[in-house]
Amino acid sequence: MYDFWYALGVTVMDDGLNKAIDSGKPKFTFVDQRIIVDLEDKVPVARLCTSPGKLDKEATESVQEKMASYLYEKYPDSPPVTLYCAGRFCQMKNIERFASCNPKSSFADILQSLQSAHTSVAGGVEPGTWARHVPALIGLCIMDGAVRNWVGTYTEESPNPDLEKVLRSFRLKTDSDDFRFVQRIVAADDFKAGMDLIWGPLSDNEPWAEGVPTLEQTIWWPGHSEYAIP
C-alpha cells in the first residue's frame, strides 16, 4: 500500500500530480450496495461496504499511466503505481460528498485544505527537497489516525516507541528536519480541517466502513484490519 500513501502525499505537496490524475479522466461506477457475507461457525455475518462500485478498465489504466509518467519524471525514486492505487483515486475523485450533509466535502475540497496546510508550512520549498519517504509518511498520516496522532503529539520529553518503530520503516528519525516538517503539516489547522471532512463524525460516505477490507493503515484497526486479506 506504500504507493498509495506516497501518491496521496505527493498530491498534497504537488498539485501537478493531482492534475495528472484528472487528465486521466478517473471513472468509477457506484452501486447501491455491496454486501460481504462471512460464515463464522456456519452463521452468516454480513458486512456492508460504503461507496462501493466498479472500476472502468480504460479509465483506471489511463489514470495509472498518467500518475506513473508524472511521478517517474519528477520523482525518480517513486514506487510503481499499482492498479489498486489508481483505482482508489478513481473512487475518491468521484465521491461527491464524503459527508452527505456537507456540499463542500468532495475529495477536491479535502485536498485543497491539505494543500493549504502544506503551503503554510513549506513556503516555497520544493517537494523533492525532503527525504524520499516523506510524501508516503504524509499520506499515511492522512489514512491512519493512530500514526497521525502519534506524529502530532510527539515531544522529545515523551518518547513514543510505537512511533519510532513506524518511522524506522520510513528511514526517518524523530530528531530529523524531515519528521519535524511532517509534524508541522499534521498540526496545521487546514490539515485538521481536511481530516474532519474524511474522518469526522459526519463523514458517512468515506469508503472505509466497519468490517470492510482496509489496506491503507499500518497500525491494527479493529473492525477493519482483520479483513485486510479477502
Image (cartoon, helix red, strand yellow):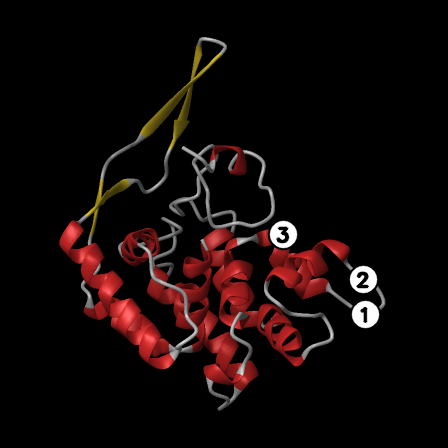
Badge 1 crowding class, 10 Å Cα cut-off, few under 14, some 14 to 19, many 20 or more, is few
The residue positioned 53% from the left and 66% from the top of the image is 138
For image coordinates 40% across by 77% down, the residue present is 75
Specify the quadrant of the image occupied by residue 17: bottom left
2 vs 3, front mark: 2
The residue type indicated by label 3 comes to: Ala
Q: Which mark is residue 159?
A: 2
| Residue at the spot of label 3 | 146
Q: Give the CA distance from mark 2 to mark 1.
A: 6 Å
**Disc 1 and disc 3 in contact, CB within 8 angstroms:** no
Q: Secondary structure at mark 1?
A: loop
Q: Position of residue 15 (x, y in %)?
A: 36, 77
Q: Which residue is mark 1?
A: 156
- Name the amino acid, label 1: Glu
Distance of label 2 from label 3 (alpha carbons): 15 Å
The dot on residue 99 is: none
Helix, strand or loop at label 3? It is helix
Q: Position of residue 158 (x, y in %)?
A: 83, 63
Amino acid carrying label 2: it is Pro
Q: Quadrant of residue 223?
A: top right
* Residue 25, position as x, y percentages in the image: 18, 63
142 relative position to 33: left or right: right
Against 212, is 23 above or below?
below
Q: Residue at x 66, y 62 (%)?
A: 168
